[in-house]
Image (spheres, rainbow, N blue to C red):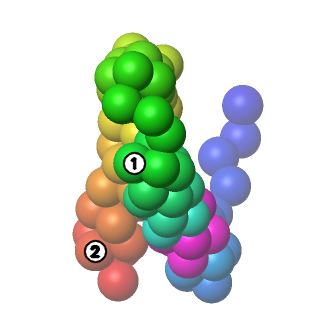
């Protein structure tokens, strides 16, 4: 398979997109926490467990990992 040159402008756009996704994920997480705070006490514990669930944590870890890789790549190829 032939390697293609990655343009700096494409890297910049990808990093901006990834940063926006990460920011949106953080906003949704904060919104979820605020909404959970408005639930009755007996429902708060259940909702907090869902928010801390493996799937949510794994998705956030993957997103942060991708963002870090893009930033590292961008720094190395300036």
Q: Determine if residue 50 is in view.
A: yes
Labelled disc at residue 75 = 2
- Expressed as whole percent of the image width and height from the top left, the position of residue 62 reads 42, 35
Q: Residue at x 47, y 49 (%)?
A: 38
The secondary structure that most of the magenta stretch takes on is: helix
- The quarter holding residue 6 reads bottom right
Q: Quadrant of residue 61?
A: top left
Sequence-wise, the earlier of marks 1 and 2 is 1
Mark 1 or 2: in front is 1
Disc 1 target residue: 37
Q: Assign the N terminus to one quadrant of the image.
A: top right
Classify the position of the C terminus by image quarter: bottom left
- Tell me if mark 2 has few (under 14), some (14-19) or many (20+) residues whose alpha carbon lies within 10 angstroms of its own: few
On screen, residue 15 versus residue 9, left or right, reads left
Q: Residue 58: give x, y in percent of width and height.
A: 40, 25
**Whole-percent x, y for residue 55 in the image:** 48, 19
Q: Which residues are magenta?
A: 15-22
Comparing 23 with 74, the one in front is: 23
Identify which residue, 10 or 56, lies in the foreground. Answer: 56
């Amino acid at each position: 398979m032939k390697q293609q040159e990655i343009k700096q402008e494409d890297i910049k756009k990808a990093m901006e997109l990834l940063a926006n996704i990460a920011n949106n994920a953080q906003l949704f997480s904060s919104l979820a926490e605020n909404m959970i705070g408005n639930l009755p006490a007996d429902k708060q514990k259940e909702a907090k467990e869902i928010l801390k669930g493996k799937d949510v944590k794994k998705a956030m870890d993957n997103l942060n990992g991708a963002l870090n890789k893009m930033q590292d790549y961008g720094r190395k190829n300036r």
